[in-house]
Amino acid sequence: MATTTYRDAASADSPQSPEFSLVVGGPLFQLMRRLRLTDSGLGLVHRRIFAAILIAWAPLVALTVAQGGRAGVDQTAAPLLKDIGFHIRFLIAVPLLIAAEPIVHRRLRPIVDQFQLRNLVRPDQAAQFGHALREAARLRNSVLAEVLMLVAVYAVGLLFTLHRYLVLGGFAANSGRGLAPAGAWLVFVSLPLLQFLFLRWFFRLFIWARFLWRTSRLDLDLIATHPDKAGGLGFLGDSLLAFAPVAAAQGVLFAGMIANRIFQGAARFADFQIEVLGGAVFLILAFAGPLALFAPQLARVKRSGLLAYGALGQTYVRGFRDKWLIGAAPNDEPLLGSGDIQSLADLGNSYGAVEQMRLAPINLLLLIYFIVAFLAPIAPLALTMMSVENLIERLVGLVF
């Protein structure tokens, strides 16, 4: 009887097997294709980045210049063009969020394919795995989901942003009656675009987490002695590298916020340690946390492996003791060169591999790379903790 794969099972309900992707699909993606801002494989990323900057940043700069370099008519407001956070949001964070799409697409698809290539999904559960793939595709393509995200951005976001920029930010026109043109563009176009991009990434993260949850409920064919020390699921840890640009974009927003407080206020970099630490912890929980869904199954595999290899080891070492220590070995069989010694060592190595098995497919080095991606945009601001003279002295001291 032929072996059933998850693609075969997926084809039972649809003419084509689902190709896993968190980003290729959805109404916005289809709109981008019609506008020739992307192709079927998320190419032409430079066009999308240029279009986003042209929509979110360029008109805001033009309107601000037309108003004398300020976002509002109120001349007591801080010049928007000198707002570091403003430029960082739309010239770095937005392009990062867009550039992350083809990266996630290319890196996550082969990760999901490993379930088939490694035969981790048992034939009797291939249909359930196929259902998980199709559900991910349905959520990704959901028109309702993207409409709700837009509603959330404008209904919930504007309740905060409109008040902030109208009352507190100096963006009001004619002594507080409404927003100046630059302020209106910022509140109703630029910021909603940024917020929608971020919200859509976290919705994609929800799709990824749900797919992992459904897969973790299957009885996967895991092996306790697998060299990746994660039962054969170590490849899932590579997803952290795929999402690193999203973490970097979050770090860019933090850097912009902190830079504004430092250069336009009296704040110090040390004042934001809790915020930076909280942001790092949140991202770890959001992106690495779903991988911990496999912990119960990996724990069962580890316990079973320890018991099985422990019983096998007990049988083997008893026979080894009886043969070589008590003296039951044949006189013409020398200990030197005997395969019994190597087998004993191999058995010990196998038991040790089970002991070292991790309870989540998270590679510490990849997790560090992910955190560094978030902290890298923030790290240069630490230089503000010392004067320019001290910085030059330390740099010269490193050379001489």
Image: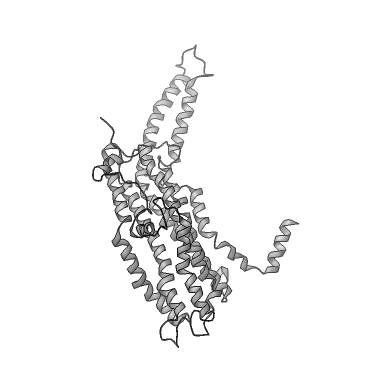
Q: Residue at point 57% right, 72% down?
A: 262
Q: Quadrant of the C terminus?
A: bottom right
Where is 73 relative to 196, above or below?
Answer: below
* Camera-side residue of 28 and 312: 28
Taking the view exactly as shown, the residue that stands out farthest to the bottom is 175
Taking the view exactly as shown, the residue that stands out farthest to the right is 400
Horizontally, is 318 left or right of 146 in the view?
right
Q: Where is residue 149 drawn, in percent x and y?
A: 34, 65
Taking the view exactly as shown, the residue that stands out farthest to the left is 13
Horizontally, is 7 left or right of 399 in the view?
left
Q: Residue at point 44% right, 52% down?
A: 43
Q: Where is residue 246 drawn, in percent x and y?
A: 46, 58
* Camera-side residue of 280 and 18: 18
Is residue 276 visible in this depiction of the protein? no
Q: Where is residue 198 drawn, in percent x and y?
A: 41, 63
Where is 351 relative to 157, above or below?
Answer: above
Q: Where is residue 140 drawn, in percent x and y?
A: 33, 55
Q: Quadrant location of residue 11? A: top left
Is residue 352 visible in this depiction of the protein? yes
Q: Quadrant location of residue 196? A: bottom left
What colour scheme governs how the chains and residues are painted in the rendered image of this protein?
Answer: one colour
Where is 212 relative to 311, above or below?
Answer: below
Q: Quadrant of the N terminus?
A: top left
Q: Quadrant location of residue 173? A: bottom left
Count of all numbered marks drawn on residues in the image? 0
